Amino acid sequence: MESLYRPEGVERRWQQTWETEGLYAAGAGRRSDESFVICVPPPNVTGELHMGHALNGTIQDVLVRWHRMRGYDTLWQPGYDHAGISTQNVVEKQLAAEGTSRQAIGREAFVARTWEWLETTGRTIMGQYRRLGASLDYGRERFTMDEDYVRAVLTFFVRLWQRGWIYRDNRIVNWCPFHQTAISDLEVEHVETDDTLSFVRYPFADGDGLEGIVVATVRPATMLADVAVAVHPDDQRYAAAVGREVVVPFVERRVPVVADERVDPEFGSGALKVTPGHDPTDFEIGRAHGLPEPMVIGLDGRMNEHAGRLAGVSQSEANDAVVAWAEERGWLEKREHYRHAVGTCERCHSRIEPLISLQWWCRMQEAVAPAIEALRERRVRYHPESQHRFAISSLEESPDWCLSRQLWWGHQLPIWYTPDGAAVCAVTEADAQAQVGEGVPLERDPDVLDTWFSSALWPYATLGWPDETPELDRYYPGDVNSTAREIIRLWENRMIWTGLEVFGEPPFHDVIIHSTVLAPDGRRMSKSLGTGIDPMEPIERHGADATRYGLLKISSTQDVRYSHGAIEEGRKLANKLWNVARLVLANTGEAAPDLRPRALEERWVIARLDTARHELEDCWARFDFASATGVLYHLTFDDFCDWYAEAVKPRLYDRDDDAAATALAVLERLLALLHPVMPHVTEEIWSQLPARASRLIVAPWPEADARFAADAAALDRVQEAAAIYRRSGVAVELGTEDERRIFEAVVRPGRGQRAGDVEAERERLRKEVARAEQMLANERFVANAPGHVVEAEREKLARYRRELDALGS
RNA sequence: GGGCGGUUAGCUCAGUUGGGAGAGCACCAGCUCGACAAGCUGGGGGUCACUGGUUCGAGCCCAGUACCGCCCACCA
């Protein structure tokens, strides 16, 4: 064994071994009927592992490995999301580079081309998960476009249809002119943008031309589709105007002035031009007042055929034309700089065009009610608690879900139209035909479903639903789900309500919302900012174990900075472990692991290991992974290496059989405790221990062992004496042979120890004594402080006095 | 605008019923002994963002302020 632990080869070797030996598969090492199930958030099939995946993968793997060691039937379900827009985007770009387009090659060829691309280039992340040491059951990989999965999606859609929650309506949507599709509110990214606010006068139709109402707009081109001017009902400035008519500039159309509470009297002039066709608020006002809904902007983002002489021109040209027209007539009051948030497509960053379009929707209110109840009753709990409240309020606010997308890559809607326009919904065309009768021609709706629709079924569609499968029976409902904060609405909440809809039970009982990992400078990690750090880099440099440890260590709060130091600490820990194992292995001869504690340091370290076991279990149960790393670090460095190993070392050199057998046994326990976080180095060392019954990955998690709990403080006197000696050079008298032996072994007095400063140490202790005396002399403290606090203070005082006494005065 | 998180050592961060300010890294010094390309030991270094309040006692609880960040949001 080399003295420097080199993770590269070791980690890859174990990753392969575990997988080929079937130890990642569901049920490996199972010793109990209880199951433990996590489904991985299906990454985009086009994507690569980023830091968030690495942290999330580590968190899930720790829980899975811990439960596997405890004998649960564990299943960690892997797979991919087809990522509708994203994937279509990639392939379209390729086609563009080849001088063609999806329209040119047609839908069938396009979909075939996408599949082809996926086979060659997609699906890279699971390889990266393997490199992280993630013990997913890779043999069960599922894809949201698998044949069976598609059937699940369509079946669920039909179910919603039968519930009466699916409807088709002309409503305002977020239209991406680049992707040529509607996208949901949640896919719109608001970006601060510099703009110009134009104040334009709308003269009264029956006035002399100078009077009128001034409105403010950043998009003068939409004036062509204005159907009213709205003011707040309580706004006295305009009270007299309500009911009159004004003339829309440029188009010179007469429109009414209406009163509506959605208008903010504080903004601009307090009057709002109403354009139901191109603005969400205006759309609502329009519907409330029964106004028409003309549109002047087309699906390509340019002015359409209803824009009169501006038809075909760009919006910015149209803006200029309208403003110029108003200015010529003196109807332009002013223009001012204006900075505001503009909706953009999160994939292509095109400016979103709100426009009215005919789409399929899902009514949400009734659908999510059971989920809200489940969350309130804590049958599902989000962690941390703040996210639980957020999840509930998100569900309460659920707007109807726009399900249709004008894409080709995805699950085509299971809806067919008859020649007279009636829509029927069925999983297969044959079923649809049966509904309308033989001989009636049917045409399938060309749209596909929102990508998140299929993700919402992930926990059970991966287990074979809608068929009744043994997997579904055994592994649904699952246990935990872990994901990023930003997809609580998009994914997490939807899995909960669909699971309740189908099974009456939520798909898991705990949801971990993990930290967002920011760049070291505190900015968001992103490719476009150049702040991204590829997790493969620390993995290759310092090892997956070190990276896992480091990511868990920093994951204490909701936004955390990536820290190289934390990963470095993980590397140190792995190296330390490796070396203490060398010490033990090199000096235990033919001994086999057997717990035969004969000496103080052995009973003590067993007690310490048991305390750490308990603390770790507590951490895992509370999903407090950051604290767990601290427990492991101090257990290894301070307790195991600095005290136990140093104390027992001379006995190992002397070939003490009991010490050797015990050393191997306590090392086993240490490795088991570390395994969920640092699986590779622990398995590597484990494989070199004699008499292995199994791999560490499926070895039993240490049982509670309270036999030596009373010895947890056994080294206190020695540790006290060591501290005094190291600072002052004075060796304090110790009571027992064991204590003196350990002191000699660990502190090694006389070997290069510098003189120390006795007087400085006395002074330090005198101050402590004085402070403690003062505390205890304070009657209010003694009367009000909890008993254990006062008692602790008394003990401290006694100890300091003892130590001072030992130094002589 | 709403919600949430953060502000503690040079850096990254712990600090869980309020009870002597901590860790890792970095820095300085000593040691080097048969695991440790290092390790061990000791040390310097902090108005716990700010202002009030509650309390015998506040990093922690309350009110407010200021910055930083994340998410959400239709103010044209």
Image: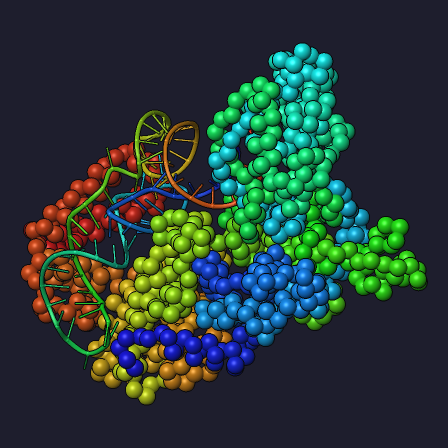
Position of residue A473 relative to residue B5, above or below, is below
Question: What x and y, as percent, mark residue A250?
Answer: 65, 26
For residue A659, side relative to residue A259 (left or right):
left
Residue most extreme to the bottom: A590
Question: What x and y, as percent, mark residue A105?
Answer: 68, 64
Can you say which quadrant of the picture contains the N terminus of chain A? bottom left
Position of residue A559 relative to residue B75, above or below, is below
Residues A675 and A749: in front is A675
Residues A304 and A359: in front is A304
Which color scheme is applied?
rainbow
Q: How many marks?
A: 0
Residue in view at x 81 percent, y 64 percent: A428
Position of residue A639 relative to residue A259, above or below, is below
For residue A677, side relative to residue A452 (left or right):
left
For residue A292, side relative to residue A572 (left or right):
right
Question: What x and y, as percent, mark residue A300?
Answer: 64, 46
Residue in view at x 69 percent, y 24 percent: A252
Residues A305 and A362: in front is A305
Q: Quick check: can you spot residue A426?
A: yes
Residue in view at x 60 percent, y 38 percent: A315
Residue in view at x 51 percent, y 78 percent: A19
For residue A314, side relative to residue A305 (left or right):
left
Question: What x and y, as percent, mark residue A475?
Answer: 64, 66
Q: Quick check: can you spot residue A134?
A: no
Image quadrant where residue A239 sits: top right
Residues A798 and A216: in front is A216
